[in-house]
């Protein structure tokens, strides 16, 4: 298995632009998570999907952030409009659930200038 | 709110030395995991512990879950440069949501 695949690896955009991050989870994993990592705040859970349905989006910072999972093999995280404070590494992770751990993707490093 | 504090935050040691990093909380967790993250990559799961007092070994790494399931430790014997990375603990109270600790950044010098 290729693991969790995220794209792009790096994204540099101007303030106010729309940014879309993509994730392909591991086949058969029914849980998908989007995390954001910064030096100041560490790893923060943004949203959790189970069987393609958003279960907990309490970590989404504000209405500028949205996430979708149209099918079991694809998810997107969109920021519109982007702001410099959104600069961070965004990780997607999937899990078969229960006490099994997460498999993380390699992340997308987002820089908003 | 569950919080997981890790100590030390930073650790720089020579190859061959032993070290222990700690993960502490005031909350009880039903399971706790340890991850290692290398620069430019996502965290990679090392181990899951679920029983109070449980000890698990992974080569030179020894993981222990506290008796009260509020804390955990990771001990590395004879550290090697390949052990360099960010070590994260993550705990859950039984739901899908794992809370990640603040991390310990380890550097092992050759």
Image (cartoon, coloured by chain):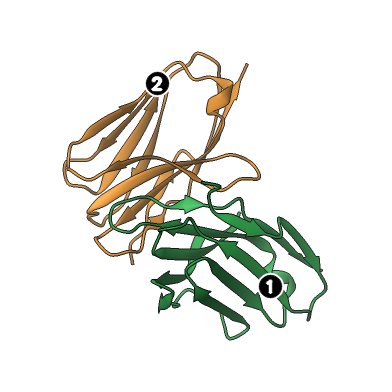
Q: Secondary structure at mark 1?
A: strand
**3D distance between C-alphas at marks 1 and 2:** 41 Å
Seen at 60% across and 73% down, the residue is A77
The residue marked by circle 1 belongs to what chain?
Answer: A
Q: Nearer the viewer, residue B67 or B50?
A: B50
With respect to residue A109, does B46 lie above or below? above
Q: Is residue A73 visible?
A: yes
Q: Is residue B85 left or right of residue A7?
A: left
- Mark 2 residue crowding within 10 angstroms, few (<14) / some (14–19) / many (20+): few
Seen at 52% across and 27% down, the residue is B83
Seen at 28% across and 57% down, the residue is A98
Give the residue pinned by disc 1: A20
**Residue B11: where, in percent of width, then height?**
53, 32
The residue marked by circle 2 belongs to what chain?
Answer: B
Determine the colour of chain B: orange
Disc number placed over residue B60 in the picture, else none: 2
Q: Nearer the viewer, residue A2 or A14?
A: A2
Q: Is residue B98 left or right of residue B87?
A: left
């Amino acid at each position: 298995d290729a693991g969790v695949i995220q794209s792009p690896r790096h994204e540099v955009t101007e303030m106010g632009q729309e940014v879309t991050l993509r994730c392909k989870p591991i086949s058969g994993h029914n849980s998908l998570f989007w995390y954001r990592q910064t030096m100041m705040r560490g790893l923060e859970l943004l949203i959790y999907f189970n069987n393609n349905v958003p279960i907990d989006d309490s970590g989404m910072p504000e209405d500028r952030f949205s996430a979708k999972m149209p099918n079991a093999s694809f998810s997107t995280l969109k920021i519109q409009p982007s702001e410099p404070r959104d600069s961070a590494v965004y990780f997607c992770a999937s899990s078969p659930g229960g006490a099994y751990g997460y498999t993380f993707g390699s992340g997308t490093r987002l820089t908003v200038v | 709110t569950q919080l997981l504090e890790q100590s030390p935050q930073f650790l720089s040691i020579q190859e061959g030395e032993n070290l222990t990093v700690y993960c502490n909380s005031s909350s009880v967790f039903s399971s706790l995991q340890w991850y290692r993250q290398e620069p430019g990559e996502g965290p990679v799961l090392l181990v899951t512990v679920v029983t109070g007092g449980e000890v698990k070994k992974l080569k030179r790494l020894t993981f222990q879950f506290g008796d009260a399931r509020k804390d955990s430790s990771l001990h590395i014997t004879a550290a090697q440069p390949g052990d360099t990375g960010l070590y994260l603990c993550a705990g859950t109270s039984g739901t899908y949501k794992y809370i990640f600790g603040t991390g310990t950044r380890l550097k092992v010098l050759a």
